Image (cartoon, rainbow, N blue to C red):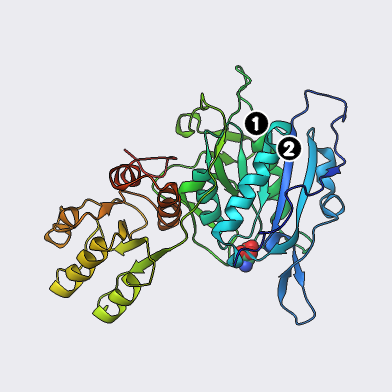
Amino acid sequence: MALFCGVNLDLPLLPLPTAADPADATAPRLLIVYTGGTVGMAVNAAGELAPMELRHLDRQMPELARLPFRLALLSLPQPIDSSNVAPADWLFLAQLIGRHYADFDGFVVLHGTDTMAYSAAALGYILEHLGKPVVFTGAQVPVGANRSDAQRNLITALEIAAARHPRAGTVRVPEVCVFFNDELIRGTRAKKVESQQFAAFKSENYPPLARAGIGLEFADNSIRLLPAAGLKIHETLEARVAVLRLFPGITEAVVSAVLQVPGLRGCVLETYGSGNAPTAGWFLDCLADARRRGVWLLNVSQCEEGRVVQGKYETSARFAALGIVGGDDITTEAAVTKLMFVLGLGVGEARTRELLATDLRGEISP
Ligand code: ASP
């Protein structure tokens, strides 16, 4: 179910009035891409929050007019609740950014919070050698409502997208990231951890890239360096993947049902602690059978901190021999999208294994 599929890439851009002189070629040019999410929602006739068009962002956020940037808004024709996002939508978003890459200095993607971490991780893989900021943000309370966090999140996300190193003048954050509630998080490290409070995201196993207080403090040493090569936009993702979360009492019927899904190409195994799993014969047989059928298995811990160390315990000793790839300290969100990305490359057994085990976009720590 890809919602943006079939949408023409030539969507109109709506210039937003700001404090920048449109003729001032030095004022940063930023593009806001609105995809949907609570940020732009309103209560529908049935009393439910539903995505709406965001045509009057400048009226709902008069503070935009004070920004010293040249701003444009690109709204997707049918904004979505991010629970409906699909891999094809990520490819579309990447193409959209590619279409406008040369004309803007940075991009802010307004997106629902529910799957923002998946989308940011996916775009991180798809946009290889990214040299400009792509900052995902959204809100827990719609922009039109009292006490909305939209203003706070969007204004700072725009400032981050425009940020340059003070002396060198180079791009400060050439990464796909998530800005939310005063923290800038690498896309491949983001996790939604809260549905009721404003602090919705956590940076897992990696420090935030920046914090917004009275000033904006960038952790420059944690930000990936500018790539030497030009942007490469990948065009394929392998969507036939699954996640199998272990729990005490999980049965053979459940494990084999997941691993025998017709056409399955990869599965994230959400294991315990440092990558541990049951040693029962039927369990290992299910994994071995999946491997024989060419299903890639990526071992990711259910713990929010720490890392997978296959072979540390007897309970993961057989994994390496079965060809299960240890995910180190990767998040489930970054692992699912990494499987889709790497399997989508279609590069053969040895290279697939190497890529799955390698840090591609800052998703695992050495
Ligand atoms: N359900 C919404 C979405 O992900 C939640 C949000 O945006 O905060 O689109």
Mark 2: is the Cβ under 8 angstroms from ligand 1?
no
The residue wearing badge 2 is 30
Residue 336: % across, % down:
42, 57
Name the quadrant of the N terminus: bottom right
Up-down relation of residue 152 to residue 198 (above or below)? above
Residue 187: % across, % down:
51, 47
Q: What crowding class fits label 2: few (fewer than 14 Cα within 10 Å), some (14-19), or many (20 or more)?
A: many
- Helix, strand or loop status at disc 1: loop
* Quarter location, residue 168: top right
Residue 349: % across, % down:
29, 48
- Helix, strand or loop status at disc 2: strand
Up-down relation of residue 16 to residue 149 (above or below)? above
Choose the circle earlier in sequence order: 2 or 1.
Answer: 2
* Quarter location, residue 316: bottom left
| Residue at 32 percent of width and 70 percent of height | 259
Residue 14: % across, % down:
84, 46
Residue type at the position of mark 2 = Leu
Left or right side of 212 for 143: right
Choose between 214 and 252: the one closer to the eye.
252
Left or right side of 295 for 54: right
The residue wearing badge 1 is 163
| Residue at 63 percent of width and 35 percent of height | 215
